[in-house]
Amino acid sequence: MEKSGVAIVGLGTVGQGVAKILLDHGDRTGRHAGRTLWLTHAVVRDVNKPLDVDLPDGILTDDLQKLIDDQSVQVVAQVIGGIEPARTIMLQLLESGKDVVTANKALLAEHGPEIFDRARQLGRSVAFEASVAGGIPIISNISQCLSGNQVQSLHAILNGTSNYIISKMDGEGADYAEALADAQALGLAEADPTMDVDGTDAAQKLAILAHLGFGARVHWSDIPRRGIDSIAKSDMEFAKHLGYRLKLIAYAELVESGIQLMVAPMMVKIGEPLAEVKANYNAVSVVGDAVGPVFFHGQGAGQMPTASAVVADMIDTAVGRTAITFKTLELWAQDNKRVDFASPGDLEGRFYFRFDVVDQPGVMGQITGRLGQHGISIASVYQHESRNENQQTVPIIIMTHHAPESAAQAAMKQILDMPTVADTAERFRILG
Ligand code: NDP
Ligand code: HSE
C-alpha cells in the first residue's frame, strides 16, 4: 500500500497517543485513507526525555528544521501546548507547505484569525477537531453535519479536568487538591492547571464553538467566566440534597439582542443528561432550529480519546477532505463580524442562593422580603439547624423561580448588607 509521510511535533500526553495509533494501527489509516500514514519525524525539545512509546530508529529528533525541509511530509500533528513557541512553529509549518492538525485550543482561541488567514493565503489547511471536547467529534458535527441549522443554544461540559475533580469530590468525597493531582497524573490537565479550574480552558473552547455554531467571532477573554476553584464542598452537598449537581457549564444561547455566553458552575437537575456526565467525560447539548436537540457525550480529555480525534484529522487532511472544508468554511476570517453580546443583566434564569445567617428571629423574613422587592419568586427554602452551639451562622438555601440576572445581583447585594448575613454567600444559576 502507498505510504504518506507524516510527523508529530510535541511528544507529550497527546503526541505519544498519536504515535501509538500511527505505529500500532497502520491498517486503520490504510483502510480509511487509502494509504498508510507513515510516521517519519517526531520532534521534541529533549531527545533524552523518557517516552512511553517505542519509536523506530531515526524518527525522534530535536531538529524542527529537518522536518520543515522534508518535502515528503505533507501532514503534521502539532501537539505542543500554550501560545509560544506553538504559534511560531505552526506558522513555520504552514509556510513550509505543510497542512497542520492541532489540539491546541488556547492557540486557536488567541491567534485563530492570524493562523487561519495565513493558512488560506498559502493554500494550506488547519484541522482542530481535538481542540474542543477531546474525543467527541463536535467540530465536524457543528460545522458540517448541522450546517443546515441555526444553532439556538449550546450547553456543554468542556473541561475534563474540572469535571473529573467535581465528580471525585461529589461522588467519592475526595478533597479538591487530591482530585486535581489525580487529574494531572492521568494527563487530563493543562501544563498550567489553573486554566482548567478557573474556567479559561472552557471559555477558549466555547469561543471556538460559538464561532462555528453562531457564525461570529468572539474572543475568549470577553466571555464572562468562573471556574470550579472557588466552589465549596458544602454547596455540592446542598445541591445533591435538593436533587441537583454542580457542573462547570459552557453556556451559549441565541436571544433577540445577540448571544449570551458564559462559563460558570451551574446547578443541573440529577437525571438530566449533563448532570450525569462523570469523570473526564465531556458533553455538548445543542439545539438547532431544524434538527431540534442533539446530545454528544464522550471522553473530553486524556491521551487516547484526544489522539483519536487528532489521527482522524490527519486522515481527513491526507485524503484532501480538510482542504475542502477549510476553504469553504472561511473559518476565523479576519473580516468575520464580531458577535453582539446580549446584555448579561437581561439573562433570565433560576438561581440557587446560599446565605450564612445569624440564627435569630426575623432573618429569614428579611431575606425573603428583599428577594420579593426585586420581583424574585421563591421556589424552595432549606435550612439546617445549627450543628452545635458554637456555630456562628447557619446556611439558608433558597432556590428561585425565573428572574433576570440584574434582579438576582441587586437582591444579593442588598441581602449581603444585612448585619445578620455573613459575606460568605453564594449564588449559582440553575440550568434550564
Ligand atoms: P503535554 O504537556 O503533555 O505535552 C506537550 C509536549 O510538547 C511536551 O512534551 C513538550 O515538551 C512539548 N514541547 C513544548 N515545546 C516544544 C518544542 N518547541 N518543540 C517540541 N516539543 C515541544 O501536553 P498535552 O499532550 O496534554 O497537550 C498538548 C496539546 O493538546 C495542548 O494544547 C492541550 O491543550 C491539548 N489537548 C490536550 C488534551 C489532554 O487530554 N491532555 C486533550 C485535548 C487537547 P517538554 O516535555 O520538553 O516540555
Ligand atoms: N485540559 C483539558 C481538559 C484537556 O481537562 O479538558 C482537553 O482539552
Image (cartoon, grey):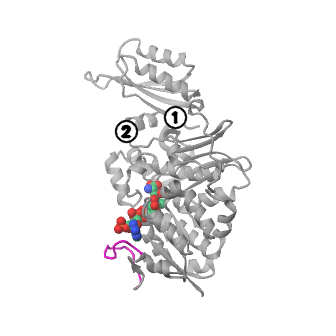
- Taking depth in this image into account, of 22 and 103 the one nearest to the observer is 103
Which amino acid, mark 1?
Answer: Arg
| Residue 50 lies within the magenta run | yes
| Residue 392, placed above or below residue 295 | above
**Above or below, comparing residue 44 to residue 186 in the picture:** below
- At 50% from the left and 67% from the top, the residue drawn is 90
**Can I make out residue 86 in this image?**
yes
Secondary structure character of the magenta stretch overall: loop
Give the side of residue 290 with respect to residue 129, left or right: right
Residue located farthest toward the top when viewing the structure as drawn: 361
Question: Could you say where residue 178 lies in the image, as x and y percent from the top left?
Answer: 31, 50
User: In the picture provided, is 120 more to the left or to the right than 205?
Assistant: right
Give the residue number, with chain letter if any, for mark 2: 233
Q: Quadrant of residue 43?
A: bottom left
Q: Which residue is mark 1?
A: 429
User: Percent x, y for residue 375?
Assistant: 57, 19
| Secondary structure at numbered mark 2 | helix
